[in-house]
Image (tube, coloured by chain):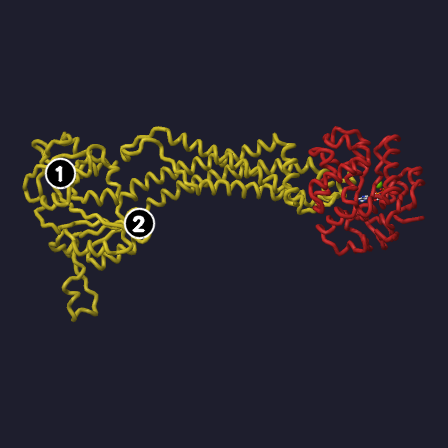
Chain colours: A yellow, B red
């Protein structure tokens, strides 16, 4: 009963000053609309870039690097076990480029609960034959089905179909840059020279474009089997295993574990893309800062209006207190006014923010990096809307707090005596 | 059954502005139920100050104030507000109606705050009181559309809404012309005679005072008779 009465008094006071109230509410509306639009847009960009890098990058990559053996013979000798052994100019010994016992390794990873899946690769260095000149290049033998499901492989494809790599034997998917140099069209045959000096014809089934120019000028894809053939190796020759985990945050730990167990090199997405998260974080931070700054400005507007209202309503406050309303009743009346400005202003702000987001979502946006994206990316996560309305209520609560406290402290005797 | 409604025991008050002056000096008196009392005295003798203390709005005094058997000194701000709401009706020189509300709603507000009756009942009770005061036809007008005399009558209706133990008035006819003063006085008289409402009214109008049951005369912060 008391709460309803307080709200009804708050509403009457508010409506009696609807013009000022509207101005205050518009301030809140504006800042919340900006907040929602900015966050939606910034996070849309974040998602897009996540997509560009994170979703397409394996969480863990197992490979074999040729490097000097850390276990030099002197270290194995018992007579030097307790001394520091300095060995200079250690050279790499001839090692294998493929992962040892790759079949068993893949089986073990597939059985691991933490892994979502894996995609093996065979990296084959080649020369593309373009008339009389040869161009350095790399052909990656991939398991198309795994690449599509785990690493959004289809997003890169600008012409042709990825699955044709699997269906058409001796086929190749050329980088856009490579294709331009070779002047090759889909359906035509290109020749590559393998590291063993063999010339092999491959049928072009499509083009891809990652947005990384240097990558697209050198790389091509083919099936694992074809790549193994190019290298003249057997069916268990695998140079890379790309792994996607269920939880990305486990990547560093799992990478270390795999490196130890499988005796390979391993790199994880966190270490490789450390600076990437910083970028996402800064963009989010920026939107929050702008939104909150606007809200604080709106908060001052509400503070002013409430102060003015209280100054005008001194008599009303005095008589409310004289007729039995307590200081806390009066405080709640003015806090209700502030918070309802925040709530309604904020709610309209959310709606306007959503409309602006939808508009931005319609603006054409073409980037060579992301052939599948045609308009500006926007994120509609409900969380931003919840944060927006919460912020607006909290800000207006604080803006109203001090004026409301002042009102609750008004001494009716002083006012009544002044008449 | 006559009982003591309000009792002032040794109430004194000083202002320290900037030198200490004693405005009330050991005020002792009690009000019985059904009494119609007027308080008179020269301007500045402390009548208003006393009334603000008796109405619990001013808590800065020495001595004791007992209302309905309860000592007000021990009560907190919110409890005093409750006492004012439930037991005291106050009519000021100025009407203090809220312009945001209708006449009826103004009268209802303290009743809604009390929460003893449903909204419909409070509305009904407010209408009854407006009828007694002869302004029920103005009930749905806005407070600022009324004349001075009408506004003061609304203020009296508001003071009566919770059936207070005592109605206090600080020169309630001070802002009114002769005709309206008489109307308001007749209303008080009727409240006392017909409804046995306890009334404590400060006035500077000798004629008004002479028609009440008891006159308390003040001089320089003391009761002289
Ligand atoms: N806030 C105050 N500070 C100092 N003196 C005051 C204050 N309020 C009232 N007074 C003084 O107290 C005395 C009594 O005032 P008041 O009770 O209003 O008199 P009355 O109502 O009888 O005319 C006056 O002399 C007045 O000047
Ligand atoms: Mg006075």
Q: Give me the C-alpha separation between circle 1 and circle 2.
A: 36 Å
Q: Nearer the viewer, mark 1 or mark 2?
A: 1
Total numbered badges shown on the rendered structure: 2
Helix, strand or loop at label 2? It is helix
Disc nearer the start of the sequence (1/2): 1
Location of the N terminus of chain A by quadrant is top right
- Give the image location of residue B74, x and y in percent: 75, 56
Residue B17 visible somewhere in the drawing: no
Contact, mark 1 vs mark 2 (Cβ under 8 Å): no
Residue A219 in view:
yes
Q: Residue at x 76, y 44 (%)?
A: B162
Q: Residues within 10 Å of mark 1 (few under 14, many from 20)?
A: few
**x and y, in percent, of residue A341 in the image:** 57, 37
| Direction bottom: furthest residue | A79
Pointer 2 chain: A
Identify the disc placed on residue A314: none
Q: Are marks 1 and 2 on the same chain?
A: yes
Q: Tell me which chain the residue with mark 1 is part of.
A: A
In the rendered image, which quarter is residue A378 located in?
top left
Q: Which mark is residue A270?
A: 2
Going by the image, does A202 lie left or right of A364? left
Q: Nearer the viewer, residue A400 or B163?
A: B163
Residue A194 lies left or right of residue B6; in this view the side is: left
Q: Give coordinates of residue A80: x percent, y percent.
A: 17, 69
User: Quadrant holding ligand 1?
Assistant: top right
- Check residue A168 in the rendering and tell me which mark sits there, or answer none: 1
Farthest residue toward the left?
A198
Q: Is mark 2 within 8 Å of ligand 1?
A: no
Residue A107 to residue A204: above or below: below
Q: Quick check: B175 left or right of A306?
A: right
Residue drawn at x 70%, y 34% is B101
């Amino acid at each position: 009963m008391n709460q309803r009465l307080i709200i009804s008094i708050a509403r009457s006071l508010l409506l009696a000053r609807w013009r000022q109230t509207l101005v205050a509410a518009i301030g809140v509306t504006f800042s919340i609309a900006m907040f929602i639009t900015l966050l939606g847009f910034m996070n849309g960009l974040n998602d897009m870039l996540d997509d560009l890098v994170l979703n397409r990058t394996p969480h863990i990559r197992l490979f074999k690097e040729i490097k000097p053996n850390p276990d030099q013979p002197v270290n194995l000798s018992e007579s030097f076990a307790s001394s520091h052994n300095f060995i200079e100019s250690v050279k790499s010994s001839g090692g294998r480029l493929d992962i040892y016992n790759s079949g068993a390794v893949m089986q073990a990873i597939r059985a691991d609960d933490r892994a979502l899946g894996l995609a093996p690769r065979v990296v084959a260095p080649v020369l593309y034959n373009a008339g009389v000149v040869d161009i350095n290049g790399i052909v990656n033998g991939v398991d198309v089905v795994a690449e599509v499901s785990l690493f959004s492989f289809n997003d890169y494809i600008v012409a042709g179909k990825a699955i044709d790599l699997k269906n058409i034997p001796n086929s190749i998917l050329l980088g856009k840059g490579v294709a331009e140099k070779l002047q090759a069209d889909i359906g035509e045959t290109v020749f590559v020279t393998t590291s063993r000096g063999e010339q092999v014809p491959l049928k072009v089934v499509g083009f891809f474009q990652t947005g990384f120019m240097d990558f697209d000028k050198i790389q091509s894809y083919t099936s694992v089997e074809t790549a193994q053939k190019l290298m003249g190796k057997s069916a268990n020759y695998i140079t890379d295993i790309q792994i996607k985990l269920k939880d990305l945050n486990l990547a560093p730990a799992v990478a270390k574990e795999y490196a130890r167990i499988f005796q390979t090199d391993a790199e994880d997405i966190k270490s490789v893309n450390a600076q990437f998260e910083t970028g996402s974080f800064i963009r989010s931070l920026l939107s929050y800062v702008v939104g909150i700054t606007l809200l604080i400005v709106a908060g001052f507007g509400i503070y002013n209006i409430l102060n003015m209202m209280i100054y005008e309503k001194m008599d009303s406050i005095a008589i409310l207190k004289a007729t039995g309303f307590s200081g806390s009743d009066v405080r709640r009346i003015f806090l209700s006014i502030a918070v309802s400005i925040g709530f309604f202003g904020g709610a309209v702000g959310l709606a306007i923010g959503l409309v602006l987001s939808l508009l931005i979502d319609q603006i054409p946006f073409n980037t060579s990096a992301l052939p599948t994206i045609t308009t500006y990316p926007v994120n509609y996560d409900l969380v931003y809307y919840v944060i927006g309305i919460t912020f607006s209520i909290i800000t207006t609560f604080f803006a109203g707090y001090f004026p409301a406290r002042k009102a609750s402290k008004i001494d009716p005797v002083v006012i009544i005596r002044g008449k | 059954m006559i009982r003591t409604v309000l009792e002032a025991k040794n109430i004194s008050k000083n202002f320290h502005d900037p030198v200490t002056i004693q405005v009330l000096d050991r005020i002792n008196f009690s009000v019985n139920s059904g009494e119609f009392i007027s308080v008179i005295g020269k301007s500045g003798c402390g009548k208003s100050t006393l009334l603000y203390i008796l109405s619990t709005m001013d808590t800065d005094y020495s001595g004791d104030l007992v209302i309905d058997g309860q000592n007000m000194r021990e009560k907190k701000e919110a409890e005093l507000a409750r006492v004012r709401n439930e037991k005291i009706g106050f009519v000021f020189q100025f009407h203090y109606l809220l312009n945001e509300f209708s006449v009826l709603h103004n009268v209802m507000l303290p009743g809604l705050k009390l929460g003893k009756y449903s909204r419909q009942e409070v509305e009904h009770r407010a209408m009854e009181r407006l009828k007694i005061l002869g302004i029920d036809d103005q009930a749905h007008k806005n407070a600022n559309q009324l004349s001075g005399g009408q506004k003061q009558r609304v203020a009296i209706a508001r003071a009566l809404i919770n059936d207070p133990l005592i109605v206090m008035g600080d020169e309630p006819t001070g802002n009114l012309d002769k005709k309206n003063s008489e109307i308001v006085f007749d209303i008080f008289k009727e409240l006392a005679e017909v409804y046995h409402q306890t009334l404590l009214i400060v006035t500077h109008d000798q004629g008004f005072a002479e028609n009440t049951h008891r006159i308390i005369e003040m001089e320089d912060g003391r009761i002289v008779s």
